[in-house]
Amino acid sequence: MTRVDFYVLEDVGQAAAMRFACQLALRARQNDMPVHIHTGTEADAEAVDELLWDYPAHRFLPHARLDLAGDTLQLYPIHIGFTATAEATLTKTAAPRLDNGCMINLAPDVPQFFGRFDRVAEIIVADQKEAGRARYRHYQTRGYHLSHHDIKDWEN
């Protein structure tokens, strides 16, 4: 069964959540785990794509966007998708690496395909707590194992 971790940051704003997602992606890759970063919009997917080129500082994380990679998607250990395209791409046979590993959810809702992954990371920033509570209830009512992590001074 999928393990779900909630990371609660004191920071405010989607930009902080995106930077923390990059940190989580780095940790997952250090453990040789494939990563899917799921966003709610194409603009957010584009912002995460830009961050992964040099965040954390001086660390390029090899990645591809689901909507742009085409047949080369399986060559990248980190995938970025957004709600409008992720479900269609994740059901294609050309994307076998997306059936395990870690999904980092930056979307306001729980994506329907979250159960494909071994782990789900939900990032909650201070100004998005209500949406985070709704996602927590979603997983809780379905019986998923939930872990809670209060994160402080993570960029220092």
Image (cartoon, grey):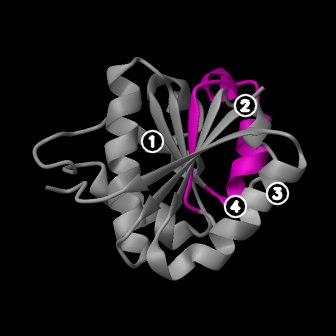
Mark-to-mark CA distance, 2 and 4: 20 Å
In front: 60, or 145? Answer: 145
Q: Amino acid at mark 4?
A: Thr
For residue 46, side relative to residue 141 (left or right): left
Q: What is the C-alpha distance between the residues marked 3 and 4? A: 17 Å
How many numbered badges does the structure rendering display? 4
Q: Does residue 75 appear to the left or right of 129 in the view shown?
A: left
Mark 3 or mark 4: whose residue is earlier in sequence = 4
Q: Secondary structure at mark 2?
A: loop
Q: Residue at x 66, y 78 (%)?
A: 130
Q: Which callout, 3 or 1, points at the residue further toward the start of the chain?
A: 1
Q: Residue furthest right?
A: 142
Q: Is residue 20 above or below residue 89?
A: below
Kindly identify which residue carries mark 4.
83
Q: Indicate which label's residue lies in the foreground, 4 or 1.
A: 4
Q: Secondary structure at mark 1?
A: strand
Q: Earlier in the sequence, mark 4 or mark 1?
A: 1
How far, Cα to Cα, is label 2 from label 1?
24 Å
Circle 1 sits on which residue? Answer: 64
| Residue picked out by circle 3 | 138
Which stretch did the figure color magenta? 82-106
Label 1 is placed on what type of residue?
Ala
Q: Earlier in the sequence, mark 2 or mark 3?
A: 2
> From the viewer's perspective, is the residue at label 3 or at label 4 nearer?
3
Identify which residue is drawn at 37% across, 26% down: 29
Q: Which residue is mark 2?
A: 2
Residue 33 position, x and y percent, is 47, 22
Going by the numbered disc 3, the residue's amino acid type is: His
Counting residues from the start of the chain, the first of labels 2 and 4 encountered is 2
Circles 2 and 3, Cβ within 8 Å, touching? The answer is: no
Q: CA distance from mark 4 to mark 1?
A: 16 Å
> Could you give the CA–CA distance between mark 2 and mark 3, rounded to whole angstroms?
13 Å
